[in-house]
Every structure is written in C-alpha cells, then in structure tokens.
C-alpha cells in the first residue's frame, strides 16, 4: 500500500502575535512536500518573513506547531534543526569585510567547533566543497579572495547561495532573495537556486513579491495577506482575478527595503520573540 510521504515542512495552526499586539500570522496551516519549490507571495507586511523564520526557529510562534522532516521544532532542538535548514536573505547578510571564501566556509560553521573556527581551521573536504559551490554558482577563482562587500549585488547573492548549500540542507528558506536585484539578475539567481536545490532534492520555501517571478519559478504559489493564506495552488491557477484579490489596496513592497530587522539569527532568536 502506498503511504503518503510526510511533508518536509509542516506548519500546524501557527499564530504569531508580536509584543506590540501585531498579529503577523493567524492560524496558518501549510505542508510543503520534499523537493518542492514553494513560493510565498504577498504584499509587504503580509507575514511572509515571519512565516519563513518560524520554520527555523528564528521566530517563535505564539501558537501552533512547526515540524521539519517529521520532527517538531522546540527550543531544545532548534540549533540542530537549523543545521539542515539554510537561509538566504534579501540583503545577503554577508560579512562584507571578509573574503568570499570565508563567507562560503562560514556556511559550514554549525559543523565546526568554535575553537577551530576561530583559528580559521576547516577540514579540507569543507574547503573543497566551498570551491565546488563557488564554481556551481558561477563565481571564478579570482573572486575567492576578494572582500564580499566589493562584489555586485547579484554576485553577493551567489555567495549567499553557495553558503546556504554548504551543509547539504534539506530545506532552504529564501526571504525575498531577489528584492534588491534587477529583473534579469533576479531570474539568473532564482534559476541557480532552483537548479541547486533540485540537485540535492532540497525543499525551498521562497518569499517573493514579484508576481511574474512567482509564476515562472514556483512549483506552487501560496498567497498571503494579513497573516493568512488566501490562495494555495499551482502557478497556472493563480489568475489575474486572484492576483487582484491578493494585492487589492495593498502595499506592493517595492519601496525602500526594510533593513531594520535584518539582524543576526542569534540576536533575533535570543531577544526578538
Ligand atoms: P512580510 O515579510 O510579508 O513583509 P513580515 O512577516 O515582515 O511581512 O511582517 C508581518 C507583520 O508583522 C507586519 O505588520 C510587520 O510590521 C510585523 N512585524 C514583523 N516583525 C515585527 C517585530 N519584530 N515586532 C513587531 N512587529 C513586527
């Protein structure tokens, strides 16, 4: 008898109310199967980022449960689960003064002891893997020792993708990964992300506010508005009527990017709940 495989990511009636009373997520249920490229689409403030961050414990829901690969996320296991859940950020979150190579290697940090990391000690296999991914994302050997901050936005996001894949993640969370890039580079980056994920059979949950990109790259579109899922289906079911309903009177989120919450995972996990 065929058994339905368990979802790789499962959110069960997730709520998130921030300390100031803002209800960012309202009874959200979502199951994402292994290997799917699931796009979370919606206007600014819809709750996309909060949802993504709930999946790796950077945001602790005020209600409901999160399961990753069948394991319920708890404060006790979130560090372990984060080793298998990589994150790609809108503003890249690179150490801009460190080299490209160091940034990619930092993706392996959860598997390297602090003492070794402080000495810059990485296993030769990790160095090889970093080189493999740098090549995979289209960066050249001469980029390796450049400071990350000297690269263009598109190149920085390539570094962000290489870093994310260093630990063979089961899940990749991409929070508006192309919001600050121009349309052609956005397509290149999303193609790269989708192909790299497919090679590993990694599940991707990617928030976007660009409808054309969501339709082009999503295996599935989940439309969010005011902390709720208001559409869930295949990209070809997401017609203009549904699009208008999702964005009616909404802020398209094309304005100045909000960098005020692009904080480090540790800080946010410790104090931002
Ligand atoms: P999106 O990613 O779709 O733009 P967010 O998940 O960032 O939406 O935000 C959802 C809602 O939660 C918004 O109203 C936002 O202002 C609010 N919010 C997000 N983070 C915080 C926070 N740390 N404190 C208070 N409100 C927050």
Image (spheres, grey):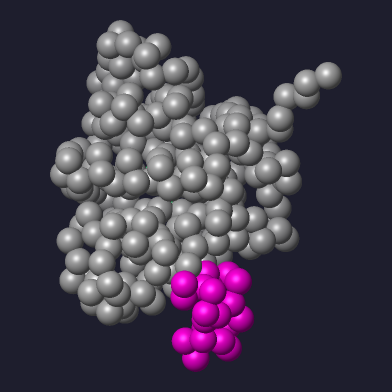
Task: Give the quarter of the image for residue 194.
Answer: top left
Q: Is residue 112 magenta?
A: yes
Magenta range is 108-128
Instruction: Check the picture and name the quadrant holding the C terminus.
Output: bottom right
Q: Residue furthest top?
A: 241
215 sits left or right of 127 in the view: left
Please tell me which residue is depicted at 68% across the width and 49% down the height of the picture.
Answer: 73
Quadrant where the N terminus sits is top right
Q: Residue sitting at 60 percent across and 55 percent down?
A: 84
Quick one: 34 or 20, which is closer to the camera? Answer: 34
Residue 183: x and y, percent?
17, 39
In the picture provided, is 259 more to the left or to the right than 175? left
- Majority secondary structure of the magenta segment? helix
Q: Is residue 177 above or below residue 120?
A: above
Q: Position of residue 199 (x, y in %)?
A: 49, 45
Is 173 or 271 nearer to us in this picture?
173
Q: Position of residue 36 (x, y in %)?
A: 52, 33
36 sits left or right of 174 in the view? right
Residue 251 lies in quadrant: top left
Residue 98, percent from left and from top: 31, 79
Q: Residue at x 73, y 24 (%)?
A: 4
Residue 2 position (above or below residue 175): above
Seen as rendered, the residue at the extreme bottom is 119
Q: Nearer the viewer, residue 71 or 16?
A: 71
Q: Is residue 129 above or below residue 179?
A: below
Q: Is residue 22 visible?
A: no
Res 216 visible: yes
Q: Which residue appears at 42% of the width and 64% of the height?
A: 132
Residue 147 falls in which quadrant of the image? bottom left
Above or below residue 29? Residue 44 is below
């Amino acid at each position: 008898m065929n058994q339905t495989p368990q979802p790789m990511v499962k959110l069960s009636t997730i709520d998130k109310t921030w300390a100031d009373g803002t209800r960012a997520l309202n009874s959200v249920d979502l199951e994402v199967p292994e290997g799917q490229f699931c796009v979370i689409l919606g206007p600014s403030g819809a709750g996309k980022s909060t949802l993504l961050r709930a999946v790796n414990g950077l945001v602790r829901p005020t209600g409901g449960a999160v399961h990753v690969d069948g394991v319920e996320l708890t404060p006790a296991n979130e560090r372990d689960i984060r080793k298998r859940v990589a994150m790609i950020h809108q503003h890249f979150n690179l150490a801009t003064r460190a080299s490209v190579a160091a940034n990619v290697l930092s993706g392996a940090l959860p598997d390297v002891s602090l003492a070794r990391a402080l000495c810059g000690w990485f296993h030769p296999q990790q160095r090889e893997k970093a080189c493999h991914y740098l090549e995979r994302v289209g960066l050249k050997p001469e980029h390796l020792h450049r400071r990350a901050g000297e690269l263009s936005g598109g190149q920085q996001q390539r570094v962000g993708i290489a870093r994310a894949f260093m630990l063979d993640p089961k899940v990749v969370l991409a929070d508006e990964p192309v919001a600050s890039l121009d349309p052609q580079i956005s397509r290149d980056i999303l193609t790269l992300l989708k192909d790299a994920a497919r090679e590993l059979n990694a599940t991707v949950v990617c928030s976007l506010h660009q409808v054309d990109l969501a339709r082009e790259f999503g295996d599935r579109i989940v439309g969010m508005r005011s902390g709720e899922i208001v559409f869930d289906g295949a990209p070809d079911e997401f017609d203009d009527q549904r699009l208008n309903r999702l964005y009616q009177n909404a802020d398209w989120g094309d304005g100045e990017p909000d960098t005020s919450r692009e904080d480090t995972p540790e800080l946010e996990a410790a104090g931002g709940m």
